[in-house]
Image (cartoon, grey):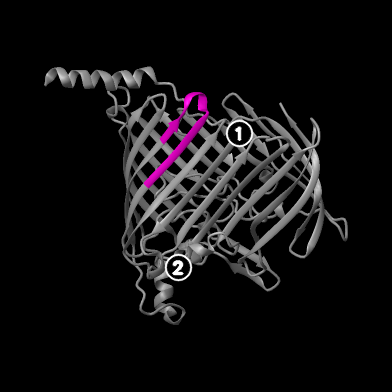
């Protein structure tokens, strides 16, 4: 028996040592290019002519992406400046500035667009974006620092606009008690403690005065949670990770008081209090030789208590924080599944899909979330890149119908020569109305421009 255990122990140790190098790098990372696309676009009922200069660079561990809009009104020739109003202004031209890779390097820092960020394993904050509107495109900060492979700190701040009060802030210290050992599986065990808080008091200026757009968050909105996870297996072909998460959404006192004060605005049979959820899942990454075929899959079982929504802080939260909080009213105890599947083929095509689906969706007052991501390198002379997200789904038949619950972007290009390309850029995003709320906004922008890769 002792001999058998010794053989098993040596086999596990050998698999960790031989394949210690991470072979799961994406072929779509660390690309350098400069693009400047000239074309026309319609925003609302106005037509603009101009370009967006979008260089993207990678220097070792450093990454830089810019988005410089130069759009002029076709009717009066005035430059469109709405994207620079409020908040951090021209700093919005920095799409991202980063150092390191999250969960791979001991130091990771990113400034700018927080699209795709998550905290820990993602039960509290996942599928997040701080850039749901051109007019209020935010510059956020994300960081993940590990000390001596034992203690770490992960943090996200949504908006470096320091006017007013604190915006969404999330922090997760974590601890790997055996991080410096060479014991397989055991050395990867990680315990995390998460906390998120938002006191956003943003107000929209209009002709009639100032209109609050964050009625419930301004007095404070918060959540906390804890998690544990470990890498169960890692070699040159497969990496398998397990995790378990608990999250509690604290009762929002401003919302609770509004329900008492204005009961006619709500379903009087619905209850509201703090809510919690529990989830456990497995994530697997599979790589065929030389990254010919690369698959990432996650399956997660979730249990929801009353007044709880998994991934509460996601892209829908930034579209309308008050509406997101009101979704918690009457949310009943239930269960669900979160699944994610992605593949990278021949380092040319990358496709990802994900679905957060409550049990018995048609009979539930909870919504599903669906997401798609497509990215290709040049196939012939064509290239495509697109993202799609939709939340609050009560009918999967509406999953791909664009409305107030959707975010979408699709870019298709055709290379004319070494330095020039033409294409169509489609955006479904949000713009702000005079009353401070958001309206869905779509833009179709055919263009021709410079595109240089190096």
Viewed as shown, does residue 262 lie left or right of 211? left
Q: Could you say which is closer to the camera, residue 411 or residue 221?
A: 411
Task: Locate the N terminus by quadrant.
Answer: top left
Viewed as shown, does residue 353 lie left or right of 57? left
Q: Position of residue 409 (x, y in %)?
A: 64, 51
Q: Residue furthest right?
A: 76
Q: Position of residue 147 (x, y in %)?
A: 39, 27
Q: Is residue 192 above or below residue 7?
A: below
Q: Residues within 10 Å of mark 1 (few under 14, many from 20)?
A: some
Q: Could you say which is closer to the camera, residue 450 or residue 321?
A: 450
Q: Residue at x 56, y 46 (%)?
A: 373
Q: Residue at x 38, y 80 (%)?
A: 268
Viewed as shown, does residue 179 lie left or right of 323? left
Q: Residue at x 65, y 57 (%)?
A: 428
Instruction: Identify the secondary structure beneath mark 1.
Output: loop
Residue labelled with disc 2: 326
Q: Residues within 10 Å of mark 2 (few under 14, many from 20)?
A: some
Residue labelled with disc 1: 348
**Which region shows up in magenta?**
285-299
Q: Position of residue 51 (x, y in %)?
A: 79, 46
């Amino acid at each position: 028996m002792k001999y058998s255990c010794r053989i098993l122990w040596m086999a596990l140790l050998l698999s960790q040592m031989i394949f210690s190098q991470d072979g799961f790098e994406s072929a779509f990372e660390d690309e350098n290019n400069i693009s400047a696309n000239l074309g026309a676009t319609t925003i609302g009922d106005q037509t603009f002519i101009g370009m967006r200069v979008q260089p993207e660079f990678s220097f070792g561990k450093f990454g830089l992406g810019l988005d410089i809009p130069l759009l002029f009104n076709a009717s009066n020739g005035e430059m469109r400046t709405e994207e620079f109003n409020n908040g951090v202004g021209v700093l919005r031209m920095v799409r991202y500035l980063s150092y390191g890779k999250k969960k791979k390097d001991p130091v990771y820092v990113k400034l700018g667009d927080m699209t795709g960020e998550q905290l820990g394993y993602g039960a509290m904050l996942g599928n997040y974006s701080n850039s749901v509107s051109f007019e209020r495109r935010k510059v956020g900060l994300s960081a993940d620092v590990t000390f001596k492979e034992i203690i770490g700190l992960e943090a996200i701040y949504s908006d470096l606009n320091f006017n007013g009060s604190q915006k969404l802030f999330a922090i997760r210290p974590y601890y790997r008690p055996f991080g410096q050992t060479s014991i397989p599986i055991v050395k990867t065990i990680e315990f995390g403690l998460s906390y998120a808080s938002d006191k956003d008091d943003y107000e929209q200026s209009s002709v009639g005065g100032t209109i609050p757009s964050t009625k419930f968050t301004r007095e404070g909105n918060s959540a906390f949670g804890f998690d544990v996870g470990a890498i169960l297996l890692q070699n040159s072909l497969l990496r398998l990770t397990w995790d378990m998460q608990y999250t509690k959404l604290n009762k929002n006192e401003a919302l609770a008081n509004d329900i008492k004060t204005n009961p006619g605005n709500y379903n009087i049979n619905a209850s509201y209090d703090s809510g919690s959820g529990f989830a456990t899942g497995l994530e697997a990454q599979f790589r065929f030789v030389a990254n010919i075929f690369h698959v990432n899959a996650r399956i997660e079982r979730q249990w929801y208590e009353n007044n709880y929504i998994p991934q509460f802080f996601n892209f829908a939260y930034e579209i309308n924080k008050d509406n997101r909080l009101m979704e918690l009213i009457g949310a009943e105890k239930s269960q669900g599944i979160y699944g994610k599947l992605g593949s990278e083929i021949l380092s040319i095509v990358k496709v990802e899909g994900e679905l957060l689906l409550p049990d018995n969706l048609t009979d539930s007052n909870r919504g599903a979330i669906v997401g798609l991501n497509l990215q290709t390198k040049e196939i012939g002379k064509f290239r495509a890149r697109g993202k799609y997200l939709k939340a609050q789904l009560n009918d999967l038949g509406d999953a791909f119908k664009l409305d107030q619950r959707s975010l979408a972007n699709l870019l298709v290009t055709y290379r004319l020569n070494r330095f020039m390309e033409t294409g169509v850029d489609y955006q479904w995003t949000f713009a702000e109305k005079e009353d401070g709320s958001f309206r869905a906004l779509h833009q179709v922008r055919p263009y021709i421009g410079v595109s240089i890769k190096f």
